[in-house]
Amino acid sequence: MSVPAANVLILPAQEVRVAGAASRRLRWLRSVEIWVPAAFLLAMLFFCFIWPLVYTVPSPVHGSLIDNNLPLWSKGHILGTDTVGDDVMARILYGGQVSFEVAAAVQAIGLVIGGALGLVAAYVGGWLDAVLMRILDVFIAFPSLVLVLAIADGLGPTEMHVIWALSAFSIPAFARVARAAALQLRDRPFVVAARLSGTKTWRILLQHLAPNMLPQLLTFTLLGAGLTMILEGGLDFLGYGIPPPTASWGNMIAAGQSFISVSPRFVFVPSIFLFVTTLALNLLGDGLRARWDAR
Amino acid sequence: MSASAIAEPGRRAGGAAETLRRLARSPALRVIGRRLLSAIPVLWGVTFLSYFILNALPGDAASALLGINATPAEVRAFSIKLGLNEPVWVRYGHWLGSALTGNLGTSAASPQSVASILGQRLPVTLELVVYALIIAFVVAVPLGVLCARWPSGVVDKLTAALSIASLSIAPYVLALVLVILFAVDLSVFPAIGFTPLTQSLAGNLRSTTLPSIVLALPLIGFYARFLRGDLVQQMQSEDYIVTARAKGVSEWRVLTRHALRNSFIGILTVIGLNLATLVGVTVIIESIFSLPGIGYELLNAISNRNIPVVEGIVLVFGVIVVLANLATDLLYGVLDPRIRRVRSRS
């Protein structure tokens, strides 16, 4: 999906107008909405990044062909093996590393560059704002997938290039959100007071505006991370992402597509991991936003 | 012209002719003019950006199309034939010049003109998008109304859960799941391929239903939630709702006649925002379902460095987005007299 897609994920916050015991129960429910996905994501991060360091996980590549196509729950291969004998669990874990790394990097790039652009555009205003907004309009009208495919195809399929390609989505999206957030804050008394007392512009931007925009941008980061994972998988799926034998969820799904009527688990296992992880990111982002909005 | 709009604020436009006359008098025409003017730099930027990005990529159309077995002399001859020996500025200038006169050039891969390729491919993609929007609307509107009728009820909670799930599922995963279910197991729909509308209507619908559902599902989740939020807010706070209730209008009628109408304004904005995304997703969907749409063509054109075709498609995407936003803006005025008034004052 493209730039506005990130905005698309922002659902209207659910309003709470219940009193007494019901409201207490609701608050408890809401915190479950935050803690369950957060715990799941932490567990996923632990299993993807730390588990393979402490515990011997079968290699995700160069599996033995003799062991190919083992079913789920086989001895030594909990999730079985794929058509070339690689352990599916190991590929999920190493593929998860790719997904998390790409998602984190793309969001970080978007947050820093896009956030700075939006902040400066909103605060300075005038022609700078107009020019930046026109450029963003170009990106909005531009089917970003074209840009992403072109970058990924042209630079060659590596993780780094996928990250740069997907940043083409995140930078304009963050710039829009940051601009909107900064516009709301720009004329608030504390900013005006800072300006009148002669605070330097960069100090107002970094110390007065940025911290107040952070909650909004952070929830946007979580929602965007889910989208990035889907897009990264999509690039792999179309053959423009991370190529096999390196494991990634997207290329596992793509590889399993050929065997879908014989053994659908090759598609389902990575799909479920992708889905649940994205779901957790969206739930966490949504939950945090509802909480911060309520304040 | 603005005075008349202020003078009769409460009156609703009666009949299509009246609406049209009103549009002609109202500042709507000025809005159209301004929007179309501001669209020009955006569209130019889109073509400029894609031309130079594609050009900066390693490889060119000549070597991509001739394949790896071509001799350097053949590649040279072909690239001269395509005009690739000229500097990129000159080539972009040529392209822009002829595009301004309505000539989008010819494909590098075949003697076909870009316009005729677009003519063949665009209807397939548009059919998908329109079909998906129809599905999304037909499901999401009743769902949103049901949720708003009983907030925090069973339907509401289920919809909330399903909607976030539908936004979390990757389109290619959803496509594969639907293919397994409906094409492999139940064989209700074909897994891949496309039947043109001219061949058979039923076959055409059968071949576009699964891809359209894939496109529509996230939209259903999103529109239903959006509608629910908007309706609930109106039902809690708006004066005209209180008035309608006080007159004894039934709750259902208040919801569907008084509140829902206003919510369509919000939905329209969202569709305008979604459209670029939706057209983008069709690239993936068309390649999974082997549909001969514009997205499928785009993938080929990018990997062949077929710049004229990419430019044509990008331009069409840009025009669609610009027109959709314009239409949204105009429909606001038609749907909500208050917006018209604000505009005429400014």
Image (cartoon, coloured by chain):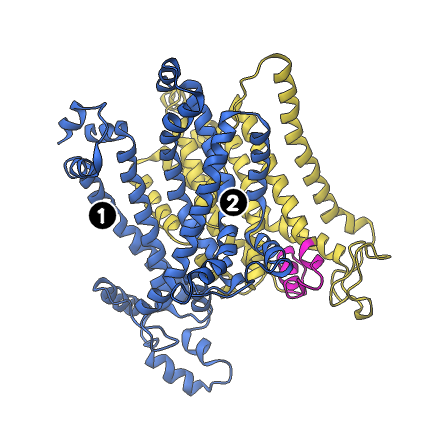
Chain colours: A yellow, B blue
Residue B114 shows in the view: yes
Element carrying mark 1:
helix
Q: Does the magenta segment cover residue A266?
A: yes
Badge 1, how many Cα within 10 Å: few under 14, some, many 20+? few
What residue is pinned by disc 2?
Answer: B218
Q: Chain of mark 1?
A: B
Picture layout, residue B44 above or below residue B158: below
Query: Label 2 sits on what residue type?
Result: Pro
Query: Label 1 sits on what residue type?
Result: Leu
Q: Chain of mark 2?
A: B
Q: Which residue is pictured at 44% across the width and 77% down the height?
A: B65
Snapshot quadrant of residue A95: bottom right
* Nearer the observer, A80 or A61: A80
Q: Position of residue A194 (x, y in %)?
A: 41, 22
Q: Does the magenta segment cover residue B338?
A: no
> Do the CB atoms of the residues marked 2 and 1 lie less than 8 Å apart?
no
Q: Which residue is pictured at 41% across the width and 61% down the height?
A: B124
Snapshot quadrant of residue B25: top left
* Nearer the observer, A94 or B172: B172
Report the magenta residues as a range: A244-268
What residue is pinned by disc 1?
Answer: B37
Asked whether, in this view, residue A279 is left or right of residue B249, the answer is: right
Q: Which residue is pictured at 25% across the width and 67% down the height?
A: B103
Residue A206 shows in the view: no
Which label sits in the foreground, 2 or 1?
2
Asked whether, in this view, residue A230 is left or right of residue B7, the answer is: right
Picture layout, residue B98 above or below residue B271: below
